[in-house]
Image: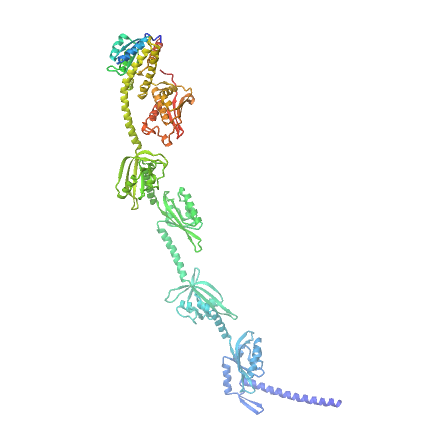
Amino acid sequence: MGEQISASNELLIRENEELRARLVETENQLAEAQELIRAIQSGDVDAVVVSGPQGEQVFTLRGAEYAYRALVEAMNEGAATLGLDGTVLYCNQRLSGLLGIPLEQMIGNPVAKLFAAEATLVFEALFSQALAGEPCTAELDFRSSQGSRIPVYVSLREMKSVDPSALCMVVTDLTERKQRDELIASGRLAASILESAAEAIAVCDHTGRIIRVNQALIELCGSNPLFQNFDAALPLELELGTAPSRPFSILEALGGETLRAQEITFVRKNRRPVFLLLTAAPIKSTSGTIGCVLTMTDITERKRSEIALQESQWEFAALANLVPQFVWMCTPDGLCFYFNQRWVDYTGLSLEESYGIAWTVPFHPDDKQAAWDAWNLAFRTGGQYRIESRLRAADGSYRWFLMRGEPQRNSDGEVSRWFGTCTDIEELKQAEQALLAERQLLETVVRRMPAAVLLAEDDDLRIRLVNPAYQDFAPGKEMAGKTLEEVWPEIGPDVPRLWRHVLATGEPHSVIDQPFDIRRSPDAPLEQTYFTWSIFRVRLPGSDRWALLNTALETTERKRSQEALIRSEKLASVGRMASTIAHEINNPLETIGNVVYLAMTDPGISLAAKSYLEVAVQELERVTHITRQSLAFHRETSTPTLIDLSGSIENILKLFANRLESRKVTVERDYAEVGRIRAFGGEIQQVISNLLSNSMDALASHGRIMFRLSSMNGGGKIRFTIADTGSGIAPERLARVFEPFFTTKEMHGTGLGLWVTKQIVEKHGGTIRVRSKLGKGTVFSIVFPVATSAKAD
Amino acid sequence: MAKSTHARILIVDDEPRIADTLALIFQHAGYLASAAYSGEDAWSCMAAHRPSLVITDVVMPGLDGVELGKRIRASYPDCQVLLFSGNADTQTILNAAEQQGYTFEVLAKPVSPPQILAKVASLLDQRSSSCS
């Protein structure tokens, strides 16, 4: 065992010595190699002798090698040679500068450390591929000494010509290209927007160079400003409020500030300046501002229309002051905020005094309410405001104005304001009033004139108008709008035929006192009337049509009174004759009366003879009565005497006894103690006789007549009434019964009886009234004053 | 009536039958009645006859009743005048007289004898009672 251990110890010591010797040799060789490399790199070595299996080889480094090295140092790309283990054998200044790592730290270190962490794997794959003899490239990120990433393009290739083998690495700095690509990518993104935008858009790089334009910008500039400096291509003036404008510089946009909708003026050579709205925003990337986008909206038109609007407002004010009307404007609430100068001049109110609701101040007090009402109505309905009203002038006088207002609506249909005028219509109004007055005068004339007027149109003779006098012909008939034949069907065809002839030919026609049997209302009885009338053709104003004008005067009364006059003339002559005869009759009657009396009072007369003579006396009395009644009553006595009315009534009843009995008329009496009246007895008897006679005419057989005497006013007056159960008098005739020549008895009466009665009653200080009801009867009542004095004969 | 009888009455009418029969009626009634047939006759006998009352017709040729009445009123104020007439136109004559201040009462012919007797009696009665 011991020998084995000592043997192995000797072996170990020997081996150790051998290894130590080889290490020293290797270290020496390494030192030599390092010295060689340093010498080659610094150019101190012109040739290198490298020992190899084929013996020692000499590589000359000067000459061609030197030129290559100078080229490698001068080139813009980074370059390095790598050992097969990935150690950097050589690198040029450019690569060292790109990475910011000194050469000493580069050479001899593994190249993989230079890459960003995630790029290492890619590089290792690249490296092994290159070793396999396949040259390859990739974009990778280096890590700089400051830790930032540097995008690079790496190209690896085996260098076979050198021995031992090495790899050649060329590095291209992609930083700038990357930035450009980024810009172009974002530019491409915006390209479609850019091109389709109506606004002029410029994209500038960080130097202010225009790198992107759209068609709108080209048109704005008049030429393509691409790749020009923005400020040079578009000299812009910034408008900042009221401050004076100043030149705009692209640097402001690149400074990182965002400009929003700034108004600028673009002054172009030989072209109109344009107004632009400028928006500028910087484009930022990870590495800071890389450019900016400028958007320019042409607002020249808007600007011009703004100016035009302002000018038109001035023009409006000028125009508003030129028109003869007052011009006003109101808010939708009715508060006035504008008046033209004419308003101020007329009313004497300042604008301040008129604004708001103060505009109502100059309205005439009588018109104020109507103006308010009209305004409120227009305000509620949003319709037109229109009213005529008087406005007070500065001097206190008033003139008529037509006020009109209309709401102005916005696009939503809401009232935005009211716009209106006041037009002076004073003269128009005066003319209108004068016209109206004239018209009213004419109407009054036509309405009040006693002559009746009718206007008929067209061939059917349709009545357009009648005046009240015409309507009075038949108060119960509707006339306007009816035809002549509809109104007067009872007059027959002759008159309508004549009227149509006049309408056709224009020949006027007149008739005097033509008799017509007419109805005063559709269901009234026919009445005999007389009319004096004329018909002529007139042209309707404002047309080419003809109308017929009929004027008429009812002459029935005149005609009747003429007839009555004739009758009374006859009566008078009969009366005169009767009067002369009466003298001749009365004298014999007197003699007979005297003789009969003498005979009756003769003492020698027989009883029989006396009874005969008594009959003669009675018959004489009858004859005497008849002559007295048929002649004049008033001749009986010349002085008024105290009359007992009941006695007078009885006297008359005696006279009418036979007629009353033949008609089976019942007479009722109701006499109170009423005192006496002072009167002419004959006249009072005539009154009673007339009334009784009328009553009997109105009575059918078996009628009743009532006489009544009663006291009034505590005995100061006497009421005498006579009532009958006769046919009564129609209301429209009742009012006329006391008129002379008015009669309901047509041909039988003189039309004088009640008139005379009234005259007699009034002569005696009395009054007479009549009440009547058709079919029921009539009551006449007379009031006489009671005779106060005892002076009597 | 007893007092009035024997009073003098003059009856005037241009118709003698009326004047005579009426005078007879008054005589039978106890009056001293006489008749005259014209106004002139009546007037001429007034002085001798001196009647208390004259009844005269109105319408007569010559001196009519009203004219006669006026003369009597003027010359014989104590004598009463009563007119009677058968004529309708009497009123106009009376009205003319009234204008001159003379008012007469007129009776219409025919007057029944009892009526005129009563009238005359009452007139004379009034007169005599007012005189006595």
Tell me the residue at 45%/68% (across/down).
Answer: A194
Image quarter hosting the N terminus of chain A:
bottom right
Q: How many marks?
A: 0
Q: Given the current orientation, which residue lies at the most extreme front position?
A: A608
Q: In the picture, residue A707 is in which quadrant?
A: top left
Q: Nearer the viewer, residue A286 or A791?
A: A791
Residue A125 visible in image: yes
In x, y percent, where is residue B100? 28, 17
Q: Is residue A157 left or right of residue A779?
A: right
Q: Is residue A586 above or below residue A467?
A: above
Image quarter hosting the C terminus of chain A:
top left
Colour style of the rendered protein structure: rainbow
Q: Is residue A452 above or below residue A207?
A: above
In x, y percent, where is residue A219? 40, 68
Q: Nearer the viewer, residue A455 or A293?
A: A455
In x, y percent, where is residue A702? 40, 25
Tell me the residue at 62%/86% (across/down).
Answer: A27
Q: Given the current orientation, which residue lies at the most extreme bottom position?
A: A55
Q: Nearer the viewer, residue A100 or B65?
A: B65
Q: In the picture, residue A505 is in which quadrant?
A: top left
Q: Nearer the viewer, residue B57 or A41?
A: B57
Q: Is residue A567 left or right of residue A389?
A: left
Q: Is residue B94 above or below residue A171?
A: above
Q: Given the current orientation, which residue lies at the most extreme left position?
A: B62
Q: In the picture, residue A24 is in which quadrant?
A: bottom right
In x, y percent, where is residue A639? 33, 18
Residue A437 visible in image: no
